[in-house]
Image (cartoon, rainbow, N blue to C red):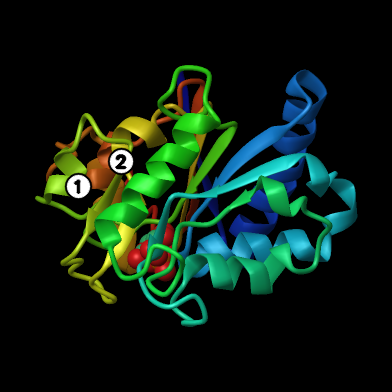
Amino acid sequence: MTTETLVFDSKHELIETAATRFVDLVTRAQAERGVASVVLTGGSNGIGILTALAADSGTIDWSRVDIYWGDDRFVPADDPERNSGQAREALLDKVPVDPSRVFPMAPSDGPLGDDIEAAAADYAAILAGRSSDGVAPEFDLHLLGMGGEGHVNSLFPHTAATAETTKSVVAVEDSPKPPARRITLTLAVVNRSRQVWFLVAGADKAEAVSAAHRGADPADWPAAGARGTEETIWFLDDAAAAGLT
Ligand SMILES: O=C1O[C@H](COP(=O)(O)O)[C@@H](O)[C@H](O)[C@H]1O
């Protein structure tokens, strides 16, 4: 397992490079396994890479990509806060994905209603059903953004969701960052991914970047607990990398 840290002069350069490497990774995974599986994330860079991919969409065979989410906000389907809605707008509505390979988390007004525990269990069942071991797929790539306090997906510092080691998906009822109700993959499942990529920009993220790089306790800095089985890559801008020596 290797860790690579790439530092860019601008957020634009960071996103463009990550998008180019995304195309390479998906193409390679499809050549090796027929289908590539990627886990999307929200946030400015998580959606930024999708916008960049939409501009260069012809290079990927999108019909052979399984698409999952690392977290989503448990709000109505048409709420602009939905990570999956933002992903559709940025990319998925513009490329020929196979709808049967796109796996959004349930919204609060879906067939499961407002039962967030049922929605989390439903996503866990989807992952289990698409795995070889009854837990979750071995994703080719899990994209992650990161908050200034080190949260990834909806795994915040000092929370039960971050400490969870058994479940693959959990409900979060009291996210410190609004909206409060979310569904998230746990670190145990993030870490089944062959590659984990952090897309992080801004001076407000520098302390968390440095904590994760020095191997801090994931309870304090959840990003420190996320890694790929083959490779972990940090795509940083200068400001986010400022605390690294
Ligand atoms: O709440 C969330 O925040 C993170 C990071 O977002 P950013 O805008 O600070 O990059 C995001 O990755 C996650 O999916 C989202 O739910």
Foreground residue, 23 or 210? 23
Q: Residue at x 42, y 47 (%)?
A: 123
Residue 151: percent from left, percent from top:
27, 55
| Pointer 2 with pointer 1, Cβ within 8 A | yes
Residue 161 image label: 1
Q: Residue at x 53, y 18 (%)?
A: 132
Question: Taking the image as drawn, is residue 150 in sight?
Answer: no
Residue 134: percent from left, percent from top:
43, 22
The vertical placement of 7 against 166, above or below, is: below
Q: Residue at x 31, y 31 (%)?
A: 188
Foreground residue, 195 or 174? 174
Relative to 155, 230 lies left or right:
right
- The picture quadrant where one finds residue 174 is bottom left
SS at circle 2 = loop
3D distance between C-alphas at marks 2 and 1: 7 Å
Relative to 49, 178 lies left or right:
left
Foreground residue, 77 or 240? 77
Q: Residue furthest right?
A: 58
Q: Residue at x 78, y 39 (%)?
A: 64
Question: Taking the image as drawn, is residue 45 in sight?
Answer: yes
Q: Which residue is mark 2?
A: 186
Residue 7: percent from left, percent from top:
51, 49
Identify the amino acid type marked 1: Ala
Q: Quadrant of ligand 1?
A: bottom left
Residue 178: percent from left, percent from top:
27, 76
State whether label 2 is within 8 Å of ligand 1.
no
Residue 117 image label: none
Count of marks placed on residues: 2
The vertical placement of 131 against 175, above or below, is: above
Identify the amino acid type marked 2: Thr
Quarter of the picture holding the C terminus: top left
